[in-house]
Amino acid sequence: MKLNTNSNAYIIIYSTILVIIVAFLLAFVSSSLRDRQEANVKLDQEKQVLNSLNLRDKGDEEAHALYEKIVKFDEARNLYECTLENGEMKYVFPMKGMGLWGGISGFVALDADMNTVYGAYFNHESETAGLGAEIKDSQAWQEKFIGKKVFDPEGNVALSVVKNVERPEYQVDCVTGATLTSNGVSDMLQKSFSQYAQSFKDELWKIIEEDRRQPNAEGEYNE
């Protein structure tokens, strides 16, 4: 009996079989690549943490080995404790926010005082190339955060990204032509560090009180 390839039944059966075969192949490929995809995502995150520690441009194997050696994730406080090869202690804080067109994220490394920025790295999902995307692509802009303070003497989160810098110890110039994305980074810093401050408030207040007792560049005390 000859099949009628123009009949509705034939078209429906053919389409159903084709869909099942394609779905099976896609599921098989996805399952086969899942472990590799997860490993790549993990490695990318490891590199981002290292970037915030000013340990950039490492090959995959070198980056992973270095990460395993110096970085430890503190699940209770949701931060990374990092002991550099020179013995210095740093804390890396992960954070997420919203830019102009989509999600943004970042890792900010602080010195042992948990107040002075040691390094920063930011990422984005869909910001405009040459403008908002500069939060990721411009190492020079990220390096502007180095040495800034996160908390003011009253314990408020003062680290921010602004158009006109009036408090250089806390503020960073926004990315040229990307005010809204820069505002997103600033909001992310404010909200994230406020949340972290609540998580270990007592520890931070001890640090802030110690900082109050230290003389400034003019030899004067903050108190």
Image (tube, rainbow, N blue to C red):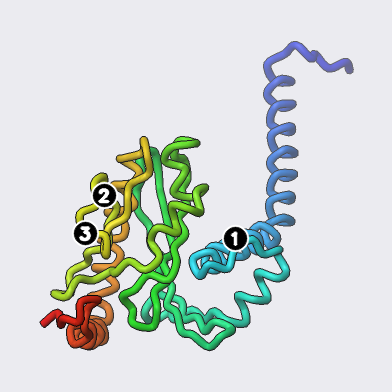
Marks 2 and 1: which is nearer the front?
Answer: 2
Secondary structure beneath disc 2? strand
For disc 1, the neighbor class at 10 Å (few under 14, some 14 to 19, many from 20) is: some
**Residue of label 1:** 44
- Residue 108 coordinates in the image, percent (x, y): 41, 66
What's under tag 3, amino acid-wise?
A: Arg
Marks 1 and 3: which is nearer the front?
Answer: 3
Q: Quadrant of the C terminus?
A: bottom left
Secondary structure beneath disc 1? helix
Which residue is outermost to the left? Answer: 223
For disc 3, the neighbor class at 10 Å (few under 14, some 14 to 19, many from 20) is: few
Say the numbered circle drawn on residue 93: none
Residue 4, image quadrant: top right
Secondary structure beneath disc 3? loop
What's under tag 1, amino acid-wise?
A: Asp
Q: Indicate whether 191 appears above or below 29.
A: below
Pick whichever of labels 1 and 3 is earlier in the sequence: 1
The Cα–Cα distance between marks 1 and 3, rounded to whole angstroms, is 34 Å
Q: Is residue 194 visible?
A: yes
Image position of 202 (left or right of 46): left
Residue sitting nearer the eye, 99 or 55: 55
Q: Are marks 1 and 3 in contact (CB under 8 Å)?
A: no
Q: Quadrant of the N terminus?
A: top right
Which residue is pictured at 31% across the width and 40% down the height? 179
- Residue 76 coordinates in the image, percent (x, y): 38, 81
Say the numbered circle drawn on residue 162: 2
Residue 6, image quadrant: top right
Q: Is residue 202 visible?
A: no
